[in-house]
Every structure is written in structure tokens, then in C-alpha cells.
Amino acid sequence: MSDRDFIRAIPVRSGDKLFVRILELLAAVIILLTVGLAIITLHGGIEAFREFGLTGFIGGKIWDPGVSKQFGALPFLVGTAVTSLGALIIAFFPAVATAVFISEYAPEWLAKLVDNLVNLIAAVPSVVIGLWGIFVFVPWMREAVYQPVFNWAMEHYPSLLPLLGNPVGYGLTSATIILALMIIPFIVALTKDAIDQVPVEQREAAYALGATRWEVIRMAVLPYSKGGILAGSILGLGRALGETMAVAMLIGNKNTFPFSLFGPGATIPSVIISEFREAVSSMHLSSLMAIGLLLFVISMLVNMLAAWMGKKVRNERA
Amino acid sequence: MKKLVFITVGIMPMIASCFQGNSAKDLDSKTTIIGAGASFPAPLITAMADEYRTYTDKKVTVNYQSIGSGGGVRQFVEQTIMFAMSEAYLEDEVLESIETSTGGKAFNIPITLADVVPIYNIPGVDKGLVFNSDVLAGIFLGRIIRWDNPEIKELNPGVDLGPLPITVVHRSDGSGTTNLWTSYLSQVSDEWKDLVGSGTSVRWPVGVGGSGNEGVAGAVMNSPGAIGYTSLSYALLNNMSYGYLVNSSGNVIEPGFESTTEAANIEIPEDTRVLFTNTSSPRGYPVAGFTWILVHENLDKNKAVKSREEAVELIRFLVWAITEGQELAEPLGYARLPETVVKRDIGMIARIKWMGEDIGQQVLDEFELLGNHS
């Protein structure tokens, strides 16, 4: 019989039963907490959904707590999607390359050093990264990238200027790059674990077929570690979706369309943290909770997608 | 051996707690006054709390949580705190609902003055650039986009302003500073009033948002050509260049304690619920406002006030804050309340009651009879 059946057949005493009950209770508590979180957020946000309608709120372009008291989530949905997906795209190849370098190419001492430094990035608090962004990164980006490109466009292609936007430095692009920096450790860690777990037989088989070092990695190692790479990417994406402080400090907080390449934007976490403390009118509060619920749903969908893709990868391998 | 250790460690706290019985009596005579609200006056209230603790021989502690004006108002309505501080007065609907639930009013008692100055970063230009209402509205609406605009040059004939583009920086988080600034712009520009309005959070037509005073200051300091707004004390503390404003009487006013106090030196309604941005006072700074303490008229109906003694201590603190406590304001960068406003405050405090008893009146008599505490 299988391992599981064997374990089930062992005689059970009351202490074991109690242990199982406690485990079940803890698991139930976690599930209840999550469901409770969703229910309370929904309860808070229902007023906004009723006022503007579900599609009206999701597709609404205007967020105006001042004059018209109209609230629409579209600018923040777009901002969140652009910054998170952009961060993943920017971070993906450097992160996978770093993991391959650590696992395959680097000498022991260098591998350990790089690994520790990469993990250190994950350990830096988000608000400290935001501060570094404000005082170092953004001025540098403005001097080195935004301003020169803007000036060049002003002279040669003035029609590009609306697309480029105001090169003040705080904006979607800066926030995306910083987010990419923040999610690299997650992708590196999980990819490196997956690469390390590739059985030595796979590598030897590839070598035996006459593959070079790079070809071994490309043919035998990376395809085998697809699962880990995927897991790392989704974890990174999840972090980028919810990242609040660094984004709020660097994204320029412009709650209106149109967004431009260099110009300011906004994401769901940035608007919630900016406006929640001082929101007095109940419609404003309700809209903030509704938009938080939207982020909750998006994260849940991303995780479900990851689980589905992970299952496909596992089935492919089997 | 292990058992002995466990027993000793277990019994020690029980023995120790027997000796603490005496101090429980001391705790009875100590009072804590709990308040929450705006972050702008937090340094002042903290200093006042410190000073007041010494004044009352450590008997009364004021515990203030700066959670923001919105949070403060919410907690005040839900009666989890004894007083709130807000940079916006309570709206009519809120006052009505409080009147229904407590049978009495909620008083908005000004405790200090807030002022907002425009800060800018123009290489080669120091503080003192003159702005008038049209120019400010034009900049923040996105109509005036370069520093060498003729309207700005007209107000500043001696200053060398080049074709530097203007970058507007505003607050991304809800704030009383934004409330004051946008209230001023709404008063001086109909276009602003219709398009953007005023409030702690608005839909800015142009510009970049910074988080908190620090965010705005950081963004302005790091971006040549940027203009933002912040409280005067913050600008002074960080050595930033700030501008002078032309007020409604046509005078160029330098932001400062005197001009802020002057701004409030006008006809104030009895309940002090007024925004005097764009003040009619001839030497007053046009972007100034009250910071109010919110307190219930019928303190017994406020669930956070648990005894008559707590209510009396709260009123004593309020009276001290608007009289002696004002000495702490200027060293910290806050302007003093003018005499006219203090009179209004006293008028409102006199009406505070506990179960119908005029305890407000009693405390005021106390202060006038006893004179100044040493």
C-alpha cells in the first residue's frame, strides 16, 4: 500500500487525536481570517459599489474627493498593472541570470557573497529604499536620463513630448525600476533553489550528448527548473502589486489620466496610504476600501493563475 | 533543582505584587486626558502636555495621538477620545448628528494658528519672491508654466528669472495644509473653485504629489524650478526659500507670526467656524487658518470622559492652553491666538457642562480668582 495508507493504519491514541484537532483548528483560523478580511473589506466598500456600479467603479476614470465626489478606480488599476508587470519584465532576466551565475559559474566564495548581497536587498525596509530613491535615484535619473531625452525630443521630435511627459523624476518609470530592484531577490532565491535541485543525471546526460556548459544549462537545467522560476516570478509579482511605501514616495501621485512615460502616476496601494488617514466623507472611505478589495481580488487571481501554471508544468514533466 | 527554580520564579511576581498595593492609591488622583487628531499641531500639543504635567505636579497627563484630522474627527464622533484636533471645523451635518446624540453642541475651540507658505527652488533666487493670487492660481492651474512669465516678472522687477519650467508639487496625502491652501485658491479664483474645489484631498490639475510635508519639501529641494506649499514652521526649520504674498488689501505680506496673528484679527463668529484665508485684515497673511480643538458641550454624554473629575481636568487644560500655554507657541514656530479669539474661546468653554452643572464656568472662575499658578 502507499505511504499514506501505511501511516493511517498505525494505531492512534487520544494524544494523536488531540494533535490533529489542534492542527485542524489552526488551519481553520487562517482560512477564517482570510475570508473575514475579504468580507470586512467588501462590507466597507459596498457603498461605493452601489453608488457607482461595479463596472462604473472599475472603469471610472475620475477620482475626485474635492468637488464632484466621484470615484473611479481605472487610473490606479492601470498604474498598478503597468508598474508591477513592468517591474517583473525588467527584473526577470537579470534575476534569472544572477541565479544561474550563483549556481553554475561563480566560484564558491563569490557565489556566497553575491547570494548574501542579493538577499540583503530584500532585507532593506521599503521606506528606506523610498528615501534612497528620493535623494539619490530620482535626481540621478532626472539628470542622466529624463532631462537629456526630454531636451533631445524638444529639439528633434516635439510631437513626442506629450508621450514623454514632465521629466521631474517622480513617476511611473522611476517607481517601476525601483520595484524591479525590490523583487529581484525573490526571483533569484527561488530560481537558485530550483536550479540546485536539478538531478545530476540530467546534467550528465546533456554532457554525454556533447553539450557545452551553456547548452547544458539551456537544455537540461533551465527547463527542469521552470517551476521554480515561475514560482519566484509570481512571488515577485505579488510583492510588486502590494508594495506601498517605496511606490508612494516615488510615483508622483497623480490620480488622473493621461499618464506619460516620465510623468507621475498612481497605484492602488499608493492612493490608499495617501488618502486613508484623512478621509472624512463616508463615500471617500468606502471608495478606498472598495479599491483595496479590487487589489485583494487581483492578488488572488494572480496566485490562482500561478497555481494553475505550476500544475501544468508539473504535469508536463510527469 | 529545576523544580526549585520554577517555583521561585513563579512565586516572585506574586510576592512583588503585594508590595504594589500602596501605589494603586496614588494612581487614583492621576488623570489622563486622551486626544487625537491633526499632525500639524502635534509638536505644540506635545510641548504643552509636557509643560502642563509639570504645572500640575505630574497629576495630569495629556496623551495626544497624531492620526490625522480625518481620524481625529471620526474618533471624536465615535466618542473614543476626550478631545480632537482638526484643521477643518466640523460641518453642519456632523454638528447636527452630535446634537441629536448628545443633546448638546460640539465646540470648535481654536487653539493655535496654521499658516501655509509657497516654497520654491529657483537657482539663484533666495526667499522673498512675491506672488499674488492670480499668479498662484495660474501656476497651480497649469496656466503659468515658466518662471519668466510676465506676470511673475511684474511683481519682482529686481529678480533675474530665466525660462525655467515650473514644476508644481502638491501633497499626495490628505492634509489640513492642503485644505488651507486650496481654500485660499478657491476664494481668489472662481476657475479653481469650480474645477478643483477645496478639501484635505483634491483632484490637482497639474503637478507631482509628495507624501507628507517631508515629501513635498524633498521633491522641491531636489527639482530646480519646483514650487510647492508647506507650513511656515516647516519651511523655516529646513531653510527653504519661501515666497511673500500680496493680500486682499494689496499689501505685500511676509509670512510670520505677526502677520498670521493679524490675519485672525477680524470679526469672528461666536462659534469660530470660519475660514479666514484671503483675510480682510489689512496686514494679515492671506493663507492662515485656525487649528481647532473639538470638545463636547455635554461632557457627561461623551463616553470617553468617565468622571466629573476628568471633565474638570480637561477644561482646566483647555483654559491653560489658550492662556499660559500660548507662551510655548512661538519658540516652536506657531503663531499666538489674538485676544479677540481667546475671548471667543472663553465664551464657548463657559458653556461646557457636566450633567447640567456649569463646570466650564466654575473652572474659568477658578483661573480668574487664583491668578497665575507658579
Image (tube, rainbow, N blue to C red):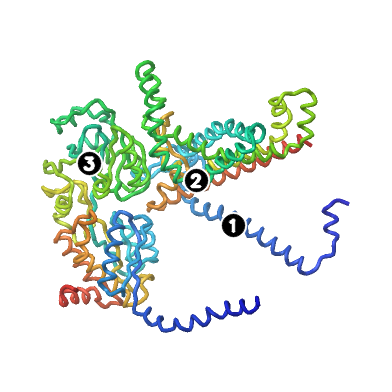
Decide: is B56 above or below B215. below
Helix, strand or loop under label 1: helix
Q: Label 3 neighbourhood size at 10 Å, few (<14), some (14-19), many (20+)? A: many
Mark 2 highlights which residue?
A: A124
Q: Marks 2 and 1, how far apart in space?
A: 28 Å
Q: Amino acid at mark 2?
A: Val
Decide: is A94 above or below B356. above
Helix, strand or loop under label 2: loop
Q: Residue furthest top?
A: A156
In the image, taking residue A48 as reference, residue B142 lies left or right, namely left
- Which numbered dot is residue A33? 1
Helix, strand or loop under label 3: loop
Q: Are dots 2 and 1 in contact, CB under 8 Å?
A: no
Asked where in the image residue B246 lies, by quadrant, the reply is top left
Residue B192 on image: x %, y %: 27, 39
**Which chain contains the residue that carries disc 1?**
A
**Which chain contains the residue that carries disc 3?**
B
Q: Residue at x 69, y 27 (%)?
A: A218
**Residues at discs 3 and 2 both on one chain:** no
Nearer to us: label 2 or label 1: 2
Residue B273 on image: x %, y %: 24, 57
In the image, taking residue B351 as reference, residue A100 lies left or right, namely right
Relative to the observer, which residue lies in front, A230 or A108?
A: A108
Mark 3 highlights which residue?
A: B242
Q: Can residue A298 be seen from the camera position used here?
A: no
- Which numbered dot is residue B225? none
Q: Amino acid at mark 3?
A: Tyr
Relative to the observer, which residue lies in front, A108 or B318?
A: A108
Q: Amino acid at mark 1?
A: Leu
Q: Residue at x 49, y 53 (%)?
A: A44
**Residues at discs 2 and 1 both on one chain:** yes
**Which chain contains the residue that carries disc 2?**
A
